[in-house]
């Protein structure tokens, strides 16, 4: 399981050119799954994400977590996090988990995150346009 996290002052997703959802501040979390991913990895990474101290305190030091800061999460499924570009110019996605299994894990991941904060989600397998105002910029990659 691989996640890319971006600290954001605002973010939104346009799903299939019709439905728009967004957050005012917090984290944008892109998540991809691979073989062997399970609920234990989901629980671990969800806790890690909401407890990362990447928001500024009163001295402008990254010392607050999302839980301290009080923001939301925009969660986006992204199988391309498992792109392999070692051979040629066309990425291989063989390490990305198949759609049905990955969709179930994505739902479980969002349920777990929802235990800690408000979560807005994209739609698994849909065409999505994501807009992010990245603060910092601050971008973190986690893997389990």
Image (tube, rainbow, N blue to C red):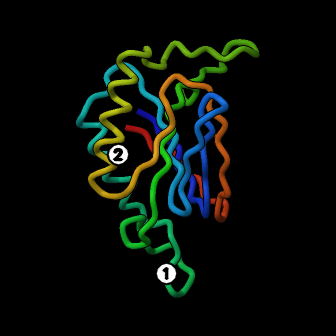
Which residue is at the front of the view, 128 or 102? 128
How far from the left and from the top, in percent, is residue 65? 41, 67
Quadrant position of the C terminus in the picture: top left
The residue lying at 76 percent from left, 16 percent from top is 89
Quadrant position of the N terminus in the picture: top left
Outermost residue to the bottom: 59
**How much space separates mark 1 and mark 2, taking CA atoms?**
23 Å
Residue bearing the label numbered 2: 45
The residue lying at 57 percent from left, 53 percent from top is 6
The residue lying at 43 percent from left, 14 percent from top is 98
Residue at disc 2, secondary structure = helix
Above or below: residue 90 compared with residue 135:
above
Which residue is at the front of the view, 118 or 83? 118
How far from the left and from the top, in percent, is residue 44? 29, 45
How far from the left and from the top, in percent, is residue 97? 43, 18
Checking the image for residue 57, the label placed there is: 1
How far from the left and from the top, in percent, is residue 129? 67, 36
Give the class, few, some or many, for how many residues have Cα within 10 Å of label 2's Cα (few <14, many ≥20). many
């Amino acid at each position: 399981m691989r996640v890319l996290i971006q600290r954001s002052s605002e973010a939104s997703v346009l799903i299939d050119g019709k439905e728009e959802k967004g957050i005012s501040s917090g984290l944008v979390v892109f998540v991809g799954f691979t073989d062997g991913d399970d609920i234990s990895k989901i629980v671990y990474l969800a806790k890690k994400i909401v407890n990362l101290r990447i928001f500024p305190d009163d001295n402008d030091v990254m010392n607050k977590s999302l839980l301290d800061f009080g923001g939301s999460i925009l969660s986006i499924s992204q199988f391309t996090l498992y792109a392999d570009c070692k051979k040629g110019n066309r990425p291989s996605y063989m390490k990305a988990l198949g759609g049905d299994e990955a969709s179930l894990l994505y739902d479980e991941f969002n349920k777990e995150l929802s235990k800690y904060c408000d979560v807005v989600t994209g739609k698994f397998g849909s065409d999505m346009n994501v807009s992010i105002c990245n603060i910092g910029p601050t971008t973190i990659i986690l893997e389990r």
